[in-house]
Amino acid sequence: MERIFSGVQPTGNLHLGNYLGAIRNWVKLQERYGCIFCVVDLHAITTWQKPLELSNNTREVAAAMLAAGVDPEKNIIFNQSQVATHAELAWIFNCVSRLGWMNRMTQFKDKAGKDRERASVGLYSYPNLMAADILSYKATHVPVGADQKQHLELCREIAIKFNHDFEVDFFPIVEPLIFGEATRVMSLKDGAKKMSKSDPSEASRITMMDSRDVIVKKIRKAKTDLDSLPSEVAGLKDRLEATNLVGIYAALAECSQSDVLKIYGGSGFSIFKPALAELCIEKLSRVQEKMSRLIADPDYLDLTLRDGAVRAREISEPIIAEVHQILGFIR
């Protein structure tokens, strides 16, 4: 059976990049695959979180999934900490994975920065937890952006090594699913940086709950160059900010960048930015209204997550039991 696993961290201020790069695509996947969608709260605590904020952010991500159209009847939606298999299998993978593999992970270097000696061990080893997330369910496919390809490759290496070391054909070799336009949405202030919740500038991102006026203001002030938009995609080369805005429009309109440039090629940003803002408002407003209603009902969100966790455990517990047997653990 083909099975999808994907997750989003509950670190607050869900933004357009989370929506276009992940959550919106999940709605399409649920028609083709058995899907498991996870709020990865264990990943979130690799950096310190205020407990109340973590709870609220977990509910916010669940609300965004449901508001975007992810069906909790067709899919499993839960938060990671409710299924112990993730943490247990991550420890086993800590013993399978190699230090050299961890040292190649560029995201740790990016996130830890110059103060890496003060970074948590969890931040260093969280790619092993990511592999455990996927393989706890023997997922066959994972939607990934460009920045996650390295972690998926590590997952594949871990599965191959586990199977080889114990002479079994147990874990699948997971395949990536890479989507089209705007799989990686960049900062509105710097086209070389990914749109991020952790960016100190609020103007760098459009959050899922931004008002109409805020969206218009942020897009109006988004960094661009002085040239008009080209008529062909090749003309966007080396124009990072222009490429980002055209990509966002294409993703929201569900068309190609070439299609966008057929309409706006030759136009200045004084024309394109208002059009992009209106499109963004139109698409997000449908989700925002539902999100607001869901966030106002935390009991419903908690029940949805608990029900999803029960269904997730039904899949993962037999798998970890087989892992125990393969390893020689006495049960």
Image (cartoon, rainbow, N blue to C red):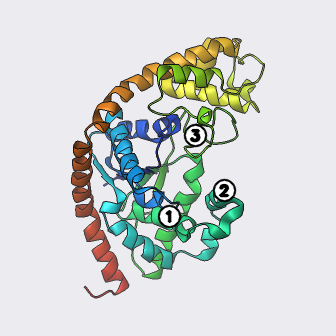
Residue 233 or 132: which is nearer the viewer?
132
Q: Kindly indicate whether the residue at mark 3 contacts the one at mark 2 (C-beta within 8 angstroms).
A: no
Residue 318 or 193: which is nearer the viewer?
193
The correct choice, above or below, for 86 with respect to 168 in the image is above
- Along the polypeptide, which appears first: circle 2 or circle 3? 2
Mark 2: give few (<14), some (14-19) or many (20+) Cα within 10 Å: few
Question: Residues under labels 1 and 3: Cα distance?
Answer: 21 Å
Q: Give the structural element (helix, strand or loop) at label 2.
A: helix
Residue 115 placement (x, y as % from top left): 68, 64
Q: What residue type is labelled 1?
A: Cys
Residue 146 placement (x, y as % from top left): 59, 47
Residue visible at 69% across and 30% down?
A: 241
Question: Residues under labels 2 and 1: Cα distance?
Answer: 20 Å
Q: Which amino acid does label 2 sit on?
A: Asp
Q: Kindly indicate whether the residue at mark 3 contacts the one at mark 1 (C-beta within 8 angstroms).
A: no
In the picture of the structure, the residue carrying the numbered disc 2 is 110
Residue 62 placement (x, y as % from top left): 34, 44
> What's the mark number on residue 83?
none
In the picture of the structure, the residue carrying the numbered disc 1 is 155
Which label sits in the foreground, 2 or 1? 2
In the picture of the structure, the residue carrying the numbered disc 3 is 184
- Along the polypeptide, which appears first: circle 2 or circle 1? 2
Q: Quadrant of residue 331?
A: bottom left
Which label sits in the foreground, 2 or 3? 2
- Along the polypeptide, which appears first: circle 1 or circle 3? 1
Q: Give the structural element (helix, strand or loop) at label 3.
A: loop
Q: Can residue 167 be seen in this view?
A: yes
Q: Can residue 74 be seen in this view?
A: no
